[in-house]
Amino acid sequence: MAIKPMLHPRNQHREGYDFERLIVRSPELAAFTTRNPRGRLTIDFSDVDAVRMLNRALLLTHYDIDFWDIPDTYLCPPIPGRVDYLHYLADLLAESNDQKIPHGPDIKALDIGTGASLVYPLTGQHEYGWEFTAVDIDPVSIKSARQICTRNGLNIRLRGQNNPEDIFEGVIGPDDIFHITLCNPPFHASLEQADKGTRRKWRNLGKGHSKKLNFGGQNAELWCPGGEIGFIARMIEQSMDFADQCLWFTSLVSKKDNLQPLSRLLKKARVAEFKVVEMAQGQKTSRFIAWTYYPESQRSL
């Protein structure tokens, strides 16, 4: 297996997928594997069921998640990239902790839009032991996340967001304190845009036309009014009301062109500091934006 040096050094998936190891832990995966031209085991990544089974095997093998399932048509996230975000967040928190990576439940993390998969709390608790609060606007996602928690005996706080215009209001209580928030915001501005993106992805995979949405995905997972930039702009504006209750607010930003207008909004919000953290995963480059209202002298964990 070739090492993928672009993934974070602590990422368990830097050497690619060890299908032999995965099949030992999750024998059901074997039925979905094929040999590529080099004779190595792989799966058809355009097959929704194969990707779901791969995720199940990865979560069991690397993160000790015995039960994981999501409703049909819901978003099935790529585990390595999602975990990379967590590792870089740990590095960000280490800057306020004498350069030591913080572990344990004293670190409070808030996952905005956790989805039916609950992927960030599942992997983040295993890797760092942080205490997670997971939020979603979709009742089906919350029900799925609760089932995953119950079946695995996990202590993850789940909160439903009832107002589609609110991001932090209604889920951050008056006594809540968080060290970090994380979010993978809806990318598209409309269902039509989401459909176009899906068709383009399927064409790139050589599969022609398909009605399948992005290997699953509900409306709230894929699009919202204003798209990614609109969502993060609302997040920035609303974060001002919770400036004292969170050390670092963060969000993934998939479109590089969105960084400049978001930076202008952060300057207007008069944050103490903001930064863009680049993450390269294989041939894809991603990033997240982070901002804090705390001056550096007050950021000690």
Image (spheres, helix red, strand yellow):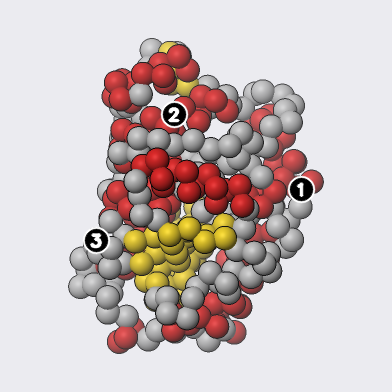
Please give the label number shown on residue 191.
1
What residue appears at the point 28 percent right and 63 percent down from the top-left corner? 105
Figure quadrant of the N terminus: top left
Residue 114 locus on image (x, y percent): 51, 53
Q: According to the image, label 3 marks what residue?
A: 103
Mark 2–mark 3 distance (CA, rounded to whole Å): 28 Å
Residue 88 locus on image (x, y percent): 36, 58
Amino acid type at image mark 1: Leu
Residue density around tag 1, few if under 14, some if 14–19, many if 20 or more, within 10 Å: some
| Residues tagged 1 and 3 counted as in contact (Cβ below 8 A) | no
* Quarter of the figure with residue 300: bottom left
From the viewer's perspective, tell me whether residue 69 is left or right of residue 195. left
From the viewer's perspective, tell me whether residue 241 is left or right of residue 212. left
N-terminal of the two: label 1 or label 2?
2
| Residues tagged 1 and 2 counted as in contact (Cβ below 8 A) | no
Residue 284 shows in this picture: no
Residue 98 locus on image (x, y percent): 20, 73
Count the marks: how many? 3
| Residues tagged 2 and 3 counted as in contact (Cβ below 8 A) | no
What residue appears at the point 57 percent right and 60 percent down from the top-left corner? 160
Mark 1–mark 2 distance (CA, rounded to whole Å): 28 Å
Q: According to the image, label 2 marks what residue?
A: 54
Amino acid type at image mark 2: Leu
Amino acid type at image mark 3: His
